[in-house]
Each structure stands twice: as structure tokens, then as C-alpha cells.
Image: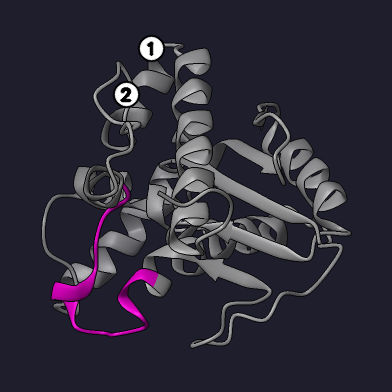
């Protein structure tokens, strides 16, 4: 069985799209569906595959070393889908609602054809194994959700947080040209995800 552990880092919309986004923001404000500043709205596109961008994709196949794709967004997506073609299980933390969703959306925007169509059906552990949902046993109560960092600490594993770059400041680091640091952080998340998956599934040595 071929497992793929993955994580992505994303960025808000590029400056060329800001004028379009200001128009969308204004219409939402007028309809009462938008709060906050236009700057906050543009920054939030880093969570939206329609206008946000992928900064890098880190992945590992089974127990192989973690690798990172860091190129033009279209090339990253093309390489990712080439790798994903014969994968049996996609494993990550919140990848159902974020990473894989974002990858699919950006693939549509950039006309990159996926090599397979994954089922995003809930309450299943294949072909997508989302650790966040599996830990909560698909309980939708917000109190049952846990962050990757918190779960790592609960399991006594070294956290990927605390370095120069974290998810909250990826956009700023990108503007400062710290691409290598962003990729390093992304790789650490994949390595941690793999360790947590093996603990959650009781794989390998226990105790």
C-alpha cells in the first residue's frame, strides 16, 4: 500500500487580483455579508482556492524522506498530480477541508487535470485519512477538534511550531523572500503528521 503524507502552505491573492477583490469586498459589504477591512478580506484569500495561491507542497511516500515542491504554482500542481497517480491513501491534518480542497481548486483555476478524482465523502478513512477528523471520531462539536500542535504535545512529540516561520506568518515570510524557511516549516509538518498517524493507527512499535 502506498501512503502519501502531505501539507501545503498558501498565500493570499497576488497584487494583480486586488482590484477584483476590492469589488467583491464592496458588494459583500453592501449586502451585509462582509465585516472587517478590505485588507483583512484580501489576506483571508490565503484560505480560498479561488484567489489564494500555493507557496509550496511538502510530501512523503511511506517512510521515504520528506520532499518539497517549490516552483511556479502550475508546475507544482502538475508534479503533485503526477506523484499522486498511484497513491492508495492520502494522509494529512485537516486535508479534507483545506489542503486537498485547495489543491483541487487551484488545479481547476490553472487548468491542471488531476490524475485521479478523490472522494471527499465524510465519515470515511480512505482514500483520504484526515487525522483531525479521525482523532475527533467525526464529532462535529467544535470542542472535540484539536490542532496539530496540541495533538503533538499530547502525544509527547516535538512540535513543528516555534520556528522562524509558522502558518500565521507565511505570507509575510514570503514577501521577505524566506522561501527556504517556508519549505522547511512545511516539511516539518509532514514529518510530524507521519509520526502522529503512526501513533493514532497504532502502527509500528508501541510502548
Q: For this view, does 206 lie left or right of residue 79? A: left
Q: For this view, does 80 lie left or right of residue 50? A: right
In this figure, what is the number of numbered marks? 2
Q: For this view, does 80 lie left or right of residue 164? A: right
Q: Which residue is mark 2?
A: 172
Q: Residue at x 39, y 73 (%)?
A: 133
Residue 48: image x %, image y %? Answer: 44, 58
Q: Residue at x 77, y 74 (%)?
A: 117
Whether residue 45 appears in this view of the structure is yes
Q: Nearer the viewer, residue 174 or 185?
A: 185
On residue 1, the disc is none
Mark 1 vs 2: CB contact within 8 A: yes
Q: Residue at x 65, y 77 (%)?
A: 126
Quadrant hosting residue 119: bottom right
Q: Does residue 128 belong to the magenta stretch?
A: no
Residue 60: image x %, image y %? Answer: 68, 40
For disc 1, the neighbor class at 10 Å (few under 14, some 14 to 19, many from 20) is: few
User: Tag 2's secondary structure?
Assistant: helix
Magenta segment boundaries in residue numbering = 135-148
Residue 65: image x %, image y %? Answer: 69, 29
Q: Which residue is mark 1?
A: 176
Residue 13: image x %, image y %? Answer: 45, 43
For disc 2, the neighbor class at 10 Å (few under 14, some 14 to 19, many from 20) is: few
User: Tag 1's secondary structure?
Assistant: loop
Q: Residue at x 78, y 66 (%)?
A: 88
The quarter of the rendered structure image containing the N terminus is bottom right
Q: Nearer the viewer, residue 179 or 175?
A: 179
Q: Nearer the viewer, residue 165 or 32?
A: 165
Amino acid at each position: 500500500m502506498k501512503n502519501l503524507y502531505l501539507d501545503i502552505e498558501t498565500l493570499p491573492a497576488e497584487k494583480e487580483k486586488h482590484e477584483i477583490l476590492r469589488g467583491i469586498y464592496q458588494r459583500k459589504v453592501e449586502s451585509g455579508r462582509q465585516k472587517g477591512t478590505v485588507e483583512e478580506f484580501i489576506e483571508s484569500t490565503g484560505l480560498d482556492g479561488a484567489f489564494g495561491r500555493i507557496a509550496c507542497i511538502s510530501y512523503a511516500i511511506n517512510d521515504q524522506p520528506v520532499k518539497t515542491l517549490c516552483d511556479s504554482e502550475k508546475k507544482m500542481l502538475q508534479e503533485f498530480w503526477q506523484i499522486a497517480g498511484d497513491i492508495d491513501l492520502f494522509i494529512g491534518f485537516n486535508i479534507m477541508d483545506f489542503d486537498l480542497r485547495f489543491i483541487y481548486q487551484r488545479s481547476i483555476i490553472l487548468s491542471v487535470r488531476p490524475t485521479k478524482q478523490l472522494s471527499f465523502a465524510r465519515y470515511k478513512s480512505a482514500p483520504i485519512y484526515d487525522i483531525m477528523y479521525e482523532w475527533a471520531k467525526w464529532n462535529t462539536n467544535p470542542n472535540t477538534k484539536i490542532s496539530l500542535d496540541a495533538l503533538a504535545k499530547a502525544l509527547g512529540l516535538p512540535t513543528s511550531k516555534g520556528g522562524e516561520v509558522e502558518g500565521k506568518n507565511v505570507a509575510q515570510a514570503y514577501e521577505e523572500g524566506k522561501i527556504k524557511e517556508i519549505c522547511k516549516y512545511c516539511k516539518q509538518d509532514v514529518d510530524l503528521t507521519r509520526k502522529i498517524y503512526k501513533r493514532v493507527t497504532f502502527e509500528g512499535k508501541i510502548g
